[in-house]
Image (cartoon, rainbow, N blue to C red):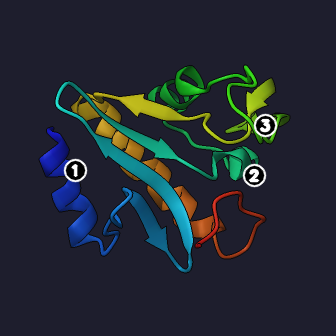
């Protein structure tokens, strides 16, 4: 699946990225799409709240766990690390801002991204969120 195919999916589901690539849903941003000549990335924002969910698809859960990024205090105004449970597994020192990013995802990873988006849609209106609408 190409970035253009993913954009089509987003548009069909009324998840149209703004000019900065952020994807709004119910007055929050659930993720960000970035397209460059040599790569495209998708970052899910509110994954820190996924601890309340379980999923029977072991491949999906493993993919999510492999994508988690850990805190390196990489920029000013860093929000710091969080110790969280994500789909049933404890992770320590997880980056609280930029922690679940997919680079040039293949077709299977894109299907997992779509599933993450569906989980995000369940929690955005109800839980603390780190990326609010401006």
How many residues crowd mark 2 within 10 Å: few (<14), some (14–19), many (20+)?
A: few
What residue does disc 3 label?
A: 85
Quadrant the C terminus occupies: bottom right
**Foreground label between 1 and 2:** 1
**Foreground label between 1 and 3:** 1
Image point (17%, 31%), residue name: 37
Quadrant the N terminus occupies: top left
First reached walking from the N terminus: tag 1 or tag 3? 1
Residue 39 percent location from the top left of the image? 25, 28
Compared to residue 8, the image places residue 32 above or below, namely above
First reached walking from the N terminus: tag 2 or tag 3? 2
Image point (68%, 48%), residue name: 50
**Element carrying mark 1:** helix
Location of residue 129 by image quarter: bottom right
How many residues crowd mark 1 within 10 Å: few (<14), some (14–19), many (20+)?
A: some
What residue does disc 1 label?
A: 6
- Per the model, the C-alpha gap separating discs 2 and 3 is 8 Å
- Per the model, the C-alpha gap separating discs 1 and 3 is 28 Å
Answer yes or no: is residue 132 visible: yes
What residue does disc 2 label?
A: 52
Please report contact status of discs 1 and 3: CB closer than 8 Å, yes or no: no
């Amino acid at each position: 699946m190409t970035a253009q195919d993913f954009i089509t999916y987003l548009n069909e589901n009324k998840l149209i990225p703004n000019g900065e690539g952020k994807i709004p849903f119910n007055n929050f941003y659930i993720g960000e799409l970035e397209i460059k000549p040599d790569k495209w990335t998708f970052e899910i924002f509110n994954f820190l709240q996924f601890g309340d969910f379980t999923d029977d698809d072991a491949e999906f859960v493993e993919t999510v766990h492999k994508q988690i990024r850990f805190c390196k205090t990489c920029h000013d105004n860093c929000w710091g690390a969080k110790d969280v449970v994500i789909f049933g597994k404890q992770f320590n020192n997880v980056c609280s801002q930029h922690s679940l990013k997919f680079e040039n995802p293949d077709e299977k990873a894109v299907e997992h991204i779509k599933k993450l988006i569906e989980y995000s849609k369940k929690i955005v209106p109800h839980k603390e969120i780190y990326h609010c609408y401006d």
